[in-house]
Image: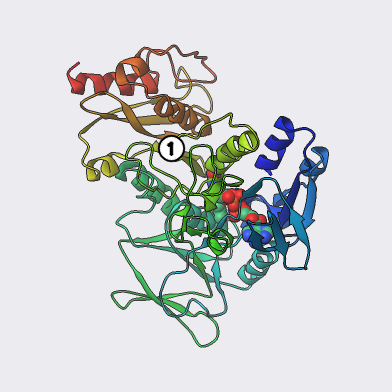
Amino acid sequence: MTAAITARRYYPETDITLIRKEEKALIPCGIPYIFGTLDSAEKNLIPDQILTNNNINLVIDSVSSINRDTKSVATASGKNFDYDRLVLATGSYPLIPPISGVDLNNVYAVKKDLEYLKDLSAKLDSSKDVVVIGGGFIGLEFADEFMKRGNLNVTIIELLSHCLLLACDEGICKLVEKKLTERGVNIMSGTKAKAILGKNNAEYVELEKGEKIKADTVILGIGVRPNVDLALDCGLAADKKEGIQVDDFMRTTDQNIFAIGDCAKKRCYLSGLPKGVWLASMGTTEARIAGANLFNVRRRSDCAIGIFSTCFGDLAIGSAGLTESAAKEMGMDVVTGEAVAPDKHPGSLPGAQELGIKLIFEKDTGLLIGGQIYGGASVGEKINFIGALIQHKMRADEVCTFQMGTHPLLTASPIAYQLINAAQLAIMKLGK
Ligand SMILES: Cc1cc2nc3c(=O)[nH]c(=O)nc-3n(C[C@H](O)[C@H](O)[C@H](O)COP(=O)(O)OP(=O)(O)OC[C@H]3O[C@@H](n4cnc5c(N)ncnc54)[C@H](O)[C@@H]3O)c2cc1C
């Protein structure tokens, strides 16, 4: 949708057609909230009016093949569409773990499919014990929303020593685990799900050490794989794990075909190595670049920083760029600065909440390479700001002297401003 709307802005005279399988498009990031906060899947739809308002033809069909010689696509219903430029935004598939029992009834992957999710919601009404396999941000969001239904015992099984460990350092992971435990979720980390047991329906999840956890419903939330089927079939360079190869202009190995979003390969902004940043925020950035570049190259894509945030009750957290542990694993020498203060000043103001920021800098250069944050609702935008500092290659001394605006009801005090103080503390460690 974002690519089509951007293309309309830059190329007002062009015919633009969007071909989509689903009759109705879900807001993917809103899927967990269907099961608790929103109380129905219909409240989580993207209105197609956005397309009609922008004079974009919407076709509900499935593209079955791409013919690059005739520059046309064929659909499952037998139609053909010619193109001058084609944008692949085929998304991703949920990853299914290679364990027995994943095909039993009552085992659900996280699919962006309205009817499938409605079926899951109905199943939850008659369930008592739910097991979520995978403690990444999507698994945790599902678990927290399930608790809001009031009828469920919810257990998360996470392979790593902590939930969220691929996105955050241990400190924030522990804060989140504590909050979810207080909200009633049972967290079992450092544990591998070995099999799902049952005759027709799932009944238990068996762990590696033999323990069995009761389960009427099992959710598989272990990640995604890019959907590169059409790209591979028509001979574009693509990898089933990493995605469709694209240049900085979002063009595939065919100059007339672009790829964006979860299906397109991403590279880490520091190492340049392939990195799985499957986020709507990244996808729409790429869509804006591709939409602008269709007939004239205008924009270049930066490598992926990976900026995300989430929230459980009154605890919001965010992460941008590399974690301290990931940077060290990569062989980097880093220093960190951490600062905590109330998010209003004075801290005695109603609604004031503790807000903590951790910044990670490369030791040799002082370059900001990552940041993490916890606190209240302002975390969502603050982590975006940290992401912008990383994208613009700011050093600790520059972060430390950046000019901010503060207000008692809206921010920390200028004296205790966490971002600046975290940078200042890191500078002291850098010895500069
Ligand atoms: C539960 C959940 C929560 C998330 N939360 C967040 C969040 O908070 N923030 C964030 O940034 N990201 C989040 N994400 C990730 C985000 O949803 C994805 O990165 C984003 O949806 C990718 O967008 P996309 O357009 O590339 O692919 P998709 O959203 O997967 O869309 C691809 C579309 O292409 C269609 N399609 C595929 N093949 C064909 C074909 N052959 N013919 C026709 N149509 C086809 C699909 O049916 C689908 O409609 C979340 C994901 C999930 C599942």
Left/right of residue 266 with respect to residue 41 in the rendered view: left
Q: Mark 1 near ligand 1 (CB under 8 Å)?
A: no
Residue 298: percent from left, percent from top: 59, 29
Residue at position x 49%, y 31% in the image: 384
Q: Is residue 142 above or below residue 420?
A: below
Q: Which residue is mark 1?
A: 303
Q: Is residue 80 above or below residue 413?
A: below
- Dot 1: element: loop
Which quarter of the picture shows residue 431?
A: top left
Residue at position x 44%, y 31% in the image: 387
Looking at the image, which is closer to me, 431 or 140?
Answer: 431
Q: Dot 1: within a 10 Å radius of its alpha carbon, few (fewer than 14), some, or many (20 or more) residues?
A: some
* Quadrant into which the C terminus falls: top left
Residue at position x 73%, y 64% in the image: 75
- In this view, the residue farthest toward the bottom is 199
Which color scheme is applied?
A: rainbow
Looking at the image, which is closer to me, 416 or 68?
Answer: 68
Residue 118: percent from left, percent from top: 68, 65
Residue 207: percent from left, percent from top: 35, 73
* Quadrant into which the N terminus falls: top right
Looking at the image, which is closer to me, 345 or 143?
Answer: 143
Q: Is residue 332 above or below residue 352?
A: below
Q: Is residue 39 visible?
A: no
Residue 225: percent from left, percent from top: 48, 59
- In this view, the residue farthest toward the front is 69
Q: Is residue 105 above or below residue 155?
A: below
Which quarter of the picture shows residue 100?
A: bottom left
Which amino acid type corresponds to the residue marked 1 in the rendered image?
A: Cys
Q: Is residue 431 visible?
A: yes
Total marks placed: 1
Residue at position x 38%, y 31% in the image: 356
